[in-house]
Image (spheres, rainbow, N blue to C red):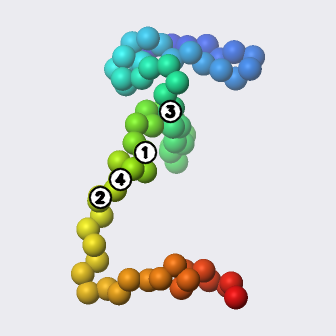
Amino acid sequence: MSEATLTSKGQVTIPADIRRAMGLSAGERVVFTQLDDGTTVMRAKTRSLNDLKGLLKPAVGRRKVAIEDMNIGRG
């Protein structure tokens, strides 16, 4: 089990063994998620929006919506 100390500025150094296990290096971002049971999960933010391109399959039988039709309440 790894341990870290919170500084007066609210900063924590992630222990080296955890950084290695998560594949983290300097400058990379992490995401914290609070669960309903009080647990906090830290994940490496490794995906960009470009990585998600093509992830969803096109909707078959549905019409395309023009950008102008998405602007609800304008006009």
Residue that appears at 53% across and 37% down:
32
Q: CA distance from mark 4 to mark 3?
A: 18 Å
Q: CA distance from mark 3 to mark 2?
A: 22 Å
Q: Are marks 4 and 3 in contact (CB under 8 Å)?
A: no
Task: Name the image quarter holding residue 8.
Answer: top right
Label 4: few (<14), some (14–19) or many (≥20) C-alpha neighbours in 10 Å = few
Q: CA distance from mark 4 to mark 1?
A: 7 Å
User: Which residue is under mark 1?
Assistant: 48
What kind of residue is marked 1? Ser
x, y percent for residue 47: 40, 42
- Residue 52 has which mark? 4
User: Which residue is under mark 2?
Assistant: 55
Q: CA distance from mark 2 to mark 4?
A: 5 Å
Q: CA distance from mark 1 to mark 3?
A: 13 Å
Q: Quadrant of the C terminus?
A: bottom right
User: Which residue is under mark 3?
Assistant: 30
